[in-house]
């Protein structure tokens, strides 16, 4: 079944800085009205001058960053009857819940589907999909590693050094290189704890370190 298409008349940038400027300049060339979010930390930021309209979040009393406040962003889009939201990169760009909330409110999310974001955001699931379609991968676990003993067994099979990685995130967090079996217990604990703190998920997997 063919998906319904509609012309975007208005666009909210859920981001700041250079990326927001580039997107707004492109939108202007396409005759799309743009909205930018003004924050308390950058009330006179350059990117605001490139928007057609400014939505003022500068009086926020929340501890959460304005660009991470999903419900406030959605509500602002609804109040201004905005057709679409562009997340830019970082912030909410890789958040499947945000993409789903946009879908729920019939606001076009400029990016992948919630399901695609979730699957590609979880490295274990992404690797399983890659393996299914015969994409070459580094040697390692086929899923999450549940224990130190399992990690040592896999490392012995593929050879040291190996690297433990957080399944639910990236950015270098939840990663530890292991050069020998005697290091595994400590590194497994460190990687898992860091993954829990950073991504609220302690799951890790293991790969050959190259």
Image (cartoon, rainbow, N blue to C red):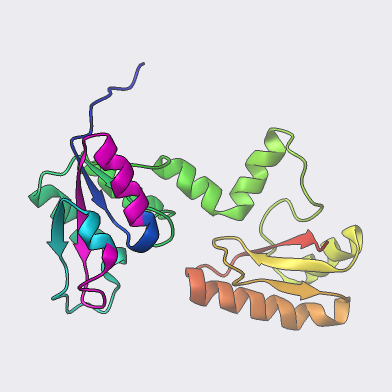
Between 202 and 133, the residue placed more toward the observer is 133
Whether 160 is among the magenta residues is no
Which residue occupies 35% across, 63% down?
17
Between 99 and 203, the residue placed more toward the observer is 99
Question: Is 134 above or below relative to 195?
Answer: above
Extreme residue in the top direction:
1
What stretch of residues is rendered in magenta?
A: 20-46
Q: Is residue 12 visible?
A: yes
- Residue 206's x, y, as percent? 74, 62
Q: Quadrant of residue 11?
A: top left
Q: Is residue 100 visible?
A: no
Extreme residue in the left direction:
79
- Residue 134's x, y, as percent? 74, 34
Which residue occupies 32% across, 62% down?
16
Between 116 and 31, the residue placed more toward the observer is 31
Question: Is 77 above or below relative to 133?
Answer: below
- Residue 98's x, y, as percent? 32, 53
Whether 27 is among the magenta residues is yes
From the viewer's perspective, is 145 left or right of 14? right
- Residue 80's x, y, as percent? 9, 49
Question: Is 94 above or below relative to 148?
Answer: above
From the viewer's perspective, is 33 left or right of 67? left
């Amino acid at each position: 079944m063919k998906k319904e298409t509609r012309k975007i008349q208005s666009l909210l940038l859920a981001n700041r800085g250079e990326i927001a400027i580039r997107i707004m300049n492109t939108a202007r060339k396409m005759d799309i009205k743009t909205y930018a979010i003004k924050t308390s930390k950058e009330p006179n930021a350059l990117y605001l001058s490139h928007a057609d309209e400014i939505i003022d979040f500068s009086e926020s009393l929340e501890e959460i960053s304005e660009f991470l406040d999903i419900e406030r962003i959605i509500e602002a889009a609804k109040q201004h009857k905005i057709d679409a939201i562009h997340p830019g990169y970082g912030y909410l760009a890789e958040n499947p819940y945000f993409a789903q909330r946009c879908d729920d409110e019939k606001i076009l999310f400029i990016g992948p589907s919630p399901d695609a974001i979730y699957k590609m955001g979880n490295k274990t699931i992404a690797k399983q999909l890659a393996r299914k379609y015969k994409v070459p991968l580094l040697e390692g676990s086929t899923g999450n590693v549940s224990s130190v003993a399992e990690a040592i067994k896999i490392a012995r099979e593929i050879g040291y050094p190996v690297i433990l990685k957080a399944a639910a995130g990236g950015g270098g967090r939840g990663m530890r290189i292991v050069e020998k079996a005697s290091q595994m217990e400590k590194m497994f604990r460190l990687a898992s704890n860091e993954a829990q703190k950073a991504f609220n998920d302690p799951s890790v997997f293991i790969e050959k370190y190259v």
